Amino acid sequence: MEKRELIYEGKAKLLYNTDDKNLVIAEFKDDLTAFNGAKKDSEAGKGALNNKISTELFKMLAQNGVESHFIEMLDDNNMLCKKVDIIMIEVIVRNVATGSLSKNLGIPDGKILPFTLVEFDYKNDALGDPKLNDQHCLILELVKNEGELDLLRAMARQINDILRPFFATKGLNLVDFKLEFGRDENGNIILADEISPDNCRFWDLETGEKMDKDRFRQGLGGLKVAYEEVLKRIIG
């Protein structure tokens, strides 16, 4: 499968058409961004690590009944995927309060939530990815009906119910994570994007050490080492 024209460039990936109209190649970049692109850098090898981590997690989710756009990893930085029409809603799943949740609502950082919280953000950099309620989603015509919002929440909780205990066995606390979904050629809503330390928060269960992109956001250093450790634990 060969790359054709570039059809999209995001903060972390390039997306290319292929000779199959229903398949695309996602190239994982080494770029790092935070705070809606206000902070930028790059880390050699970061893209390859996210590709490998996402590959392992997509495979594991598929074995547990979660369909995604993932087809196969082509090489260190490239993944073959089903072409989907991305739903412009970022689905945020939170198990522990931190980041914007603590900042905006005053919930103590590190507080375990009484239940898993699922939030919607508008996937719109120009507007700063604002929070959405169900009515916003319908007014903006991001989904067809309320049933699709219920489906997004149910799929997000299903994914959390699979990933959270899995990571616990690897000594990692899945604090929160962001998911994106899209419609395949038949109009079915499936998981898309990636699942990696770029869009998940992982804290070591014993030490509380942050092993995700917060190392870049907060200037802690050691990002690549943390990502390598996450991959090592996943495949170990």
Image (spheres, rainbow, N blue to C red):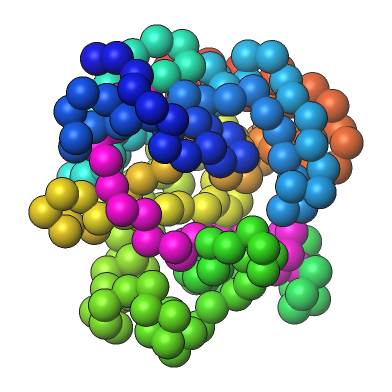
How far across and how far down the image is residue 227, in percent? 63, 24
Nearer to the camera, 163 or 51: 51
Decide if residue 169 is in sight here.
no
Quadrant location, the C terminus:
top left
Q: Which residues are magenta?
A: 79-102
Residue 197 sits in quarter = top right
Q: Position of residue 208 (x, y in %)?
A: 73, 40
Residue farthest along the top direction in this orientation: 75
Q: Is residue 128 above or below residue 232?
A: below
Q: Position of residue 47 (x, y in %)?
A: 57, 22
- Which residue is more in the foreground, 3 or 146? 3
Q: Residue at x 79, y 37 (%)?
A: 40
Specify whether residue 121 is in view: yes
- Between 173 and 74, the one lying in front of the other is 74
Q: Residue, x 46% and y 11% (percent of image)?
A: 76
The quadrant in which residue 52 appears is: top left
User: Does the segment drawn in magenta span residue 83?
Assistant: yes
Residue at the spot 32% in from the left edge and 74% down from the top edge: 143
Side of 108 where 78 appears, left or right: left
Is residue 131 part of the magenta span, yes or no?
A: no
Question: Could you tell me which residue is drawn at 30 percent across and 60 percent down?
Answer: 155
Q: Is residue 135 above or below residue 207?
A: below
Q: Quadrant of the N terminus?
A: top left
